[in-house]
């Protein structure tokens, strides 16, 4: 038995469950104008960032999320040159995007500069591509950024946000998806973290529905494990102006950069649709 004080616990009351990580120390805590950020040193997951009580990033398992938020969409788009990351302040998605040599410009738009400053201090490896001349880091509201942007100016939009409450709430509605659709070029693709398939199925179904209502021709969800997120199983949902079944498998198989989870077989497998999920989409969308 361990003293409860040695543990960080995030509970999911709606699902009668919780995640606990044994901690060595709390390294930092602050309230920014947008959210409360905590950093822990854990016993077996390395450093851990928590925002408003929800786990965001751990040293040990962030590669799963960051690789699956980026490489599947970049190997689905026929020629991704310009990429926006809305949220993503820990810079892990930016680092993965910049591994693609065909990307000419990647803009990360996070509302809260403190997330990035703390990531630079506590997760320096996630920030190692921040100095890449193709990278631009902006600290403004992603909803406003998309509203103000011109038509047809971006190839891929990655929404790497917190949960759909607080500042991220407006990143999950039809008005936002309409603006993204307007900003994307002809073959443009939006991909958004879409929570747990086990715990948040109605949310994922509603994302499919409103992405299509917003004008996207196709939507598809991909799945991956993520120990520190509710249920340990996570998803991202893509919305395409064109065909989303255009995996550039040859390019993925010949990739010259290292990944720890993503490869061409993982790409194909991640899009396999579980029975309960397909049934729910047919019923709810
Ligand atoms: N991987 C994480 C997850 O799924 O839990 C997300 C990590 S990332 C740190 C989430 C970021 O979204 C935070 O840095 C937060 O500041 C940012 N964010 C939330 N709402 C936003 C908005 N409206 N515009 C831009 N960034 C936003």
Image: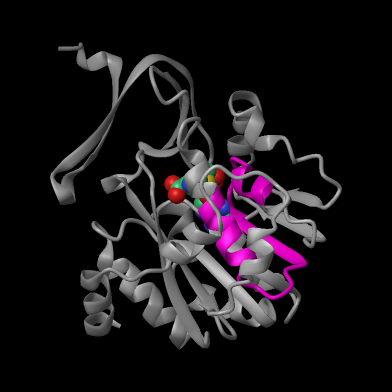
Q: Is residue 128 visible?
A: yes
Question: Which residue is at a point 29% across and 14% down the rendered structure image?
Answer: 6
What x and y, as percent, mark residue 114? 61, 35
What x and y, as percent, mark residue 151? 73, 81
Question: Which residue is at a point 51% across and 55% down the rendered structure image?
Answer: 68
Q: In terms of depth relative to the viewer, which is nearer, 68 or 38? A: 68
What x and y, as percent, mark residue 10? 28, 35
Report the residue that reaches farthest toward the right. 133
In this picture, residue 83 sits left or right of residue 16: right
What x and y, as percent, mark residue 65? 48, 48
Question: Which residue is at a point 54% across and 79% down the rendered structure image?
Answer: 244
Q: Quadrant for residue 185, please give it.
A: bottom right
Quadrant, the C terminus? bottom left
Q: Is residue 52 visible?
A: no
Is residue 70 a member of the stretch shown in magenta? yes
Is residue 88 a member of the stretch shown in magenta? yes
Q: Is residue 225 above or below residue 102?
A: above
In this picture, residue 250 sits left or right of residue 264: right
Quadrant, the N terminus? top left
In this picture, residue 172 sits left or right of residue 190: left
In this picture, residue 40 sits left or right of residue 126: left
Question: Which residue is at a point 68% across and 77% down the rendered structure image?
Answer: 183
Q: Is residue 114 above or below residue 270?
A: above
Q: In terms of depth relative to the viewer, which is nearer, 247 or 128? A: 247
Q: Quadrant for residue 153, please give it.
A: bottom right
- Highlighted magenta segment, given as a residue range: 67-96
Q: Is residue 207 above or below residue 53?
A: below
């Amino acid at each position: 038995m361990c003293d409860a004080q040695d543990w960080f616990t995030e509970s999911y009351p709606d699902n009668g469950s919780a995640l606990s990580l044994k901690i060595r120390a709390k390294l930092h805590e602050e309230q920014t104008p947008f959210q409360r950020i905590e950093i822990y040193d854990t016993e077996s997951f390395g450093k851990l960032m928590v925002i408003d009580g929800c786990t965001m990033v751990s040293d040990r398992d962030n590669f799963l999320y960051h690789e699956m938020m980026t490489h599947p969409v970049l190997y689905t788009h026929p020629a991704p040159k310009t990429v926006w990351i809305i949220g993503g302040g820990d810079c892990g998605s930016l680092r993965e995007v910049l591994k693609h040599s065909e990307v000419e410009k990647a803009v990360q738009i996070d509302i809260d500069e403190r997330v990035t400053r703390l990531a630079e201090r506590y997760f320096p490896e996630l920030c190692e591509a921040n100095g890449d001349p193709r990278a631009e880091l902006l600290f403004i509201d992603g909803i406003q950024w998309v509203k103000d942007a011109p038509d047809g100016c971006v190839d891929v939009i990655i929404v790497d946000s917190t949960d759909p409450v607080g500042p991220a709430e407006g990143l999950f509605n039809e008005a936002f998806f309409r603006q993204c659709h307007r900003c994307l070029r002809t073959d443009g693709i939006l991909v958004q973290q879409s929570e747990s398939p086990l715990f948040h199925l109605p949310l994922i179904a509603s994302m499919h529905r409103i992405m299509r209502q917003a004008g996207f021709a196709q939507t598809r969800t991909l799945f991956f494990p993520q120990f520190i997120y509710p249920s340990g199983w996570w998803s991202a949902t893509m919305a395409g102006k064109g065909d989303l079944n255009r995996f550039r498998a040859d390019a993925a198989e010949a990739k010259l950069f290292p990944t720890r989870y993503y490869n061409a077989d993982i790409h194909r497998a991640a899009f396999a649709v579980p029975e309960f999920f397909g049934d729910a989409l047919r019923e709810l969308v």
